[in-house]
Structure formats: structure tokens, C-alpha cells
Amino acid sequence: MEFKISAVYLIYLGIEMNLNLKTLFCGLGLVASVSASAAVITEDFAGNTFNSSNFETIYGPGVLANETWGSTPGSVRDMLRTVNDSYNPAADSVLTISADFSFHGSDISFLSWRSDGTHNPGVYSEPLSGLTLRLHENGNIDVAQGYDFTNLIANVDSSSALFQLDTTVRINIVDDGLNVAISMLNLDNLLTHDFNITSSFNAGGHVAFATTSGNSDWDNISIDQTPAAVPEPGVLALLSLGVIGFTARRLKK
């Protein structure tokens, strides 16, 4: 209530000082705009558990060890995906994904978003839908539907590789519904790789993490889709009434 009264009082002062109402509304637009609470979820697998209200596993439970999550050893695809299946980025509601990834041997892994959270029957195939970051320890790393940098990044056995065995790469994805910016930073050797893609894929869905052979893992996941600041209807209604009332009073005078 204190906020609303002060806003109306600002209108009164503006009118008494003969301020232009258009200018006044522009200024008050900043006051009347409120940001919707950010839809942020995080998971660091502390205590070798995860928050089941945020994430679920399909195809298999995977393995929680060393406060990370990965697949069961052997050629088995396990997937960890968000319970929320409505992550649909847009210009006014940007989706940001961050996660730490590590190879510990021969493996293939996937990070998918705007996805239905399922995969092709083949263990080593990409998920069926959405945008997918495909990670393979032999340098065959690509993004489905838009960007392919196969063999651009050296084999993990190379000392010049971005992805190396038993090192951690932080992956960041920023998707505004059309433009996707992806950046990678090896936290051990500080090598980086950044690129952008443009995608016409316009569906929403889960954010999903998958591994295959039990030789890679995910950690420190953060997913944020923050709506743009929007006017609060109640505040705008009160501001409008205040302007009408004070304007009528001034005209009467």
C-alpha cells in the first residue's frame, strides 16, 4: 500500500508543478513496472541426491557419485530432465542454462533444451526433439539443427583439447527463442570456445542431460527463464485513477 500511495502522490506533485503528463507517465512507467519472480532452479547434487521437485530420471536412474550425476556404466542411456516441460524461450523471456561437464573415459553425452526429453532408440543417437549439444570424447562435438564443429576440438587425449579427461568444462547456453549463444570454458586449462546459432525451432519443453557409458558426468546445473519486467495491473489502474482525479481537479480550478 505504501508503494501505491507514494506513486499517486508523485502524480499529484507532477501536476501541481505543471509537468507534462506524457513525461510523467514515462517516468512512472519505471516505478510501475515490476519483474515477475525468476524461474530459477539449481542442482549441485550435494549429498549425492537431487531435488525431485525440479528433476526426474528416465530410461534409468543414473549414478550419483562424488556429488555429480552420470549414467550407469556400460552402453546404457540414462537421462536427467526437468520436471517442468514448458521452457520455451522468447525475446522477452530468455532461457539461460549453465552446467559443468566432465569426461572420464570413452563416452557420448547430450544436453538438450526445448525437448520432449526422449531419445532415438539407438543408444548413441541424439534426442528426438529440441536443440541438442552433442558431446563425444573423440572430438565429434556438434549442435543438432544448426551448428557442427566436428573435429574442431581435439581428442581428449590431446593436451590442446578443450575437453580433456578428468577436467571440467563449464557450458553456458543463452537462448532468446531465435538466437542461441553457447560458450564453453575448461575450468582447469582455461581454454574456451564460443559460438552462436540461429534456430527457427519454436517449441518449448524440458531441459535434459544424458550420458551413455558411465564415463562422464554433470554437475552444478542452473536453469533460469526470467520473464521481462511487466506492469502490475493493480498499480497501473490506481495510477490511472489518480491522474484522472487530479487532472479533473486542476481543470475545475
Image (cartoon, rainbow, N blue to C red):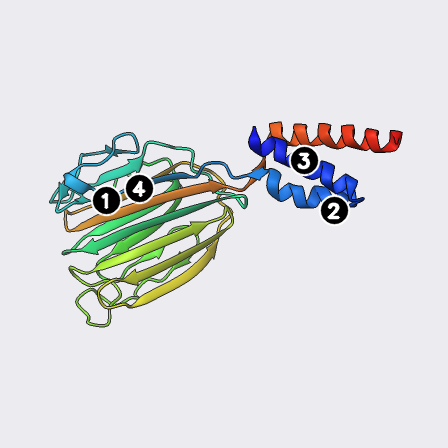
Alpha carbon distance from label 1 to label 4: 7 Å
Contact? badges 3 and 4 (CB < 8 Å): no
Residue 23, numbered circle: 2
Q: Which residue is mark 3?
A: 9
- Disc 4 target residue: 42
Closer mark to the observer between disc 1 and disc 2 = 2
Circle 1 is placed at which residue position?
A: 44
Q: Tell me if label 1 and label 2 are in contact, CB under 8 Å.
A: no
Q: Position of residue 171 (x, y in %)?
A: 32, 55
Front residue of 90 and 72:
90
The amino acid type, in three-letter code, at marker 1 is Asp
Which residue reaches farthest bottom?
160
Which is more N-terminal, label 2 or label 1?
A: 2
Up-down relation of residue 102 to residue 48 (above or below): below
Query: Visible in this render: residue 125?
Result: no
**Of callouts 3 and 4, the N-terminal one:** 3
Alpha carbon distance from label 3 to label 4: 41 Å
Helix, strand or loop at disc 2?
A: helix
Q: Amino acid at mark 4?
A: Thr
Q: CA distance from mark 1 to mark 2?
A: 47 Å
Q: Quadrant of the N terminus?
A: top right
Tag nearer the camera, 2 or 4: 2
The image shows residue 176 at horizontal and vertical percentages of 49, 48
Q: Type of residue at label 3?
A: Tyr
Q: What residue do we see at 38% from left, 40% from top?
A: 40
State which tag comes first along the sequence, 2 or 4: 2
